[in-house]
Amino acid sequence: MNINVTLLGQMITFALFVLFVMKFVWPPIIKALQDRQKKIADGLEASDQGKHELELARKKSLDLLHEARAQAKQVVDQANTQASQNIEDAKAKGLKENQRIIADAQNEIYREVGLAKQEVKKELKDMVLLATEKLLQKEVDQATNQQLIENFIKEI
Amino acid sequence: MIEVHQPANSTEYIQHHMTHLMLNLHNGTLTNGGFWTLNIDTLVVSFLLGLLFLIPFWIVAKRATSDTPGPLQNLIEILVNFADKQVQETYRGYSSFLGALALTIFVWVFIANFMDLIPVDLLPWGAEHVGIPYLRVVTSADLNFTFGLSVSVFFLTLGFAIYEKGSLGYLKELLMTPFGVWFAPVNFVMHVIEELARPVSLSLRLFGNMYAGELIFILIALIPWWTQWPLGLAWSIFHILIITLQAFIFMVLTIVYISLTKDSH
């Protein structure tokens, strides 16, 4: 346990060790520590930000939902109105069509009746002529008696 | 065949354990040559222990990541953070030199102290078998180791003081405080005593603790084998506290001494 020249050797070793640590060990580790600290701080801040954004998004989605509901309600109402309108329209149209068809049929009937009448008249004329011929035992000249027959038919 | 020395009695056993592997620089023999003697065991062991500390730290520093650290990086980060915190709490302003100094002192002294917990006979016994007659592995129980640290710290303190106050300012403080200019010699002597007491107490505190600890382990090794283990266990557990505490005290006092140069009294 004497002080001897070992002391100098120890001091040199110590100085070298400290310099080595200062140059190669201390800065990278401190930097890593600081970087991590920053990362953690950033992460916490980002998580706060995320929470805030989530809250905003929730609010926004709720708003959108309300809006969509209102819109849907409006659309349904509109559709209902439109549908009843359509039904009314269709009813009116159907009625009109119905009336038209009835009118057409009536017209047709009138026309048919007219035609039938004419046919009957013609038949009748022929029958009258035939009957007259039978009665008179003589052929009746249609041309000469035309006026007569027609007058007769008109009277019927 | 190497002859293994067997101690004749307990005095010789203790003396053998307390003798350094010395190299006499006068004639190159393994004898004590006064001041010009190298304690080979202290130099080599402390250097190897330093490598044991520096190499893992260096490897980790090279691939230090700010993402999730591995277990080794985790451990080293704890130590670095610890040293950094001690410096920041005491020293005003940032100094990566002071951090490196504190870290080196703490870890190196701790590892050196830790050699005390290795069974006292194990390494010297092994060394004798490869032809090394003396080996003391607890380098912090060598005054040269502890004074090597504290004298370096002393010079650093001087350097910091002169850097902070200027050489004139420092001289003025040495002569003028605390009693004023008329008591300059008294002031100077007081300052010299104050400054010298620091490295002496710093190194003797560590040396005393480690030397005593080592001596007690040697004494425990001398008692009958069946009483060795409870005493050895008790002293080891107690000593774990001491080696950590002494390393911590050495580091903190170093920081404090250097920080004091910055505060104006």
Image: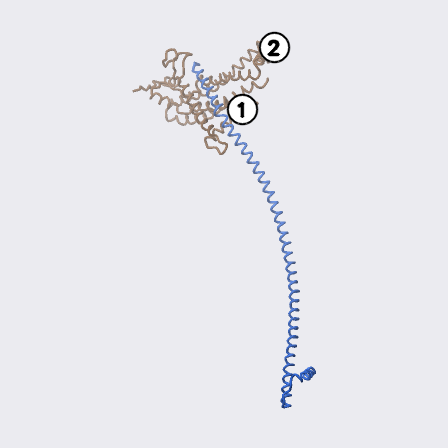
Callout 1 secondary element = helix
Please, which residue is most extreme toward the left here?
Answer: B1
Of labels 2 and 1, the one closer to you: 1
The answer to which quarter of the image holds residue A5 is: top left
- Mark 1: few/some/many CA within 10 Å (<14, 14-19, 20+): many
Give the color of chain A as drawn: blue
Q: Position of residue B181 (x, y in %)?
A: 61, 10
**Quadrant the N terminus of chain B occupies:** top left
Q: From this view, report whether residue B232 is shown above or below residue B184.
A: below
**Type of residue at label 2?**
Val
Q: Position of residue B50 (x, y in %)?
A: 44, 23
A119 lies left or right of B151: right
**Type of residue at label 1?**
Val
Q: From this view, report whether residue A4 is shown above or below residue A150.
A: above
Q: Which residue is mark 1?
A: B87
Chain containing mark 1: B
Q: Position of residue B75 (x, y in %)?
A: 47, 30
Q: Which mark is residue B181?
A: 2
The residue lying toward the viewer, choosing from B13 and B92, is B92
Comes first in the chain, label 2 or label 1: 1
The residue lying toward the viewer, choosing from A84 and A21, is A84
Q: State the colouring used for the structure image.
A: by chain
The answer to which quarter of the image holds residue A37 is: top right
**Quadrant the C terminus of chain B occupies:** top right
Give the color of chain B as drawn: brown
Callout 2 secondary element = helix
Q: How many marks?
A: 2
Q: How far apart are the two marked residues, 2 and 1, measured between alpha carbons?
A: 34 Å
- Mark 2: few/some/many CA within 10 Å (<14, 14-19, 20+): some
Q: Residue at 36% across / 21% down in the picture?
A: B127
The residue lying toward the viewer, choosing from A128 and B152, is A128
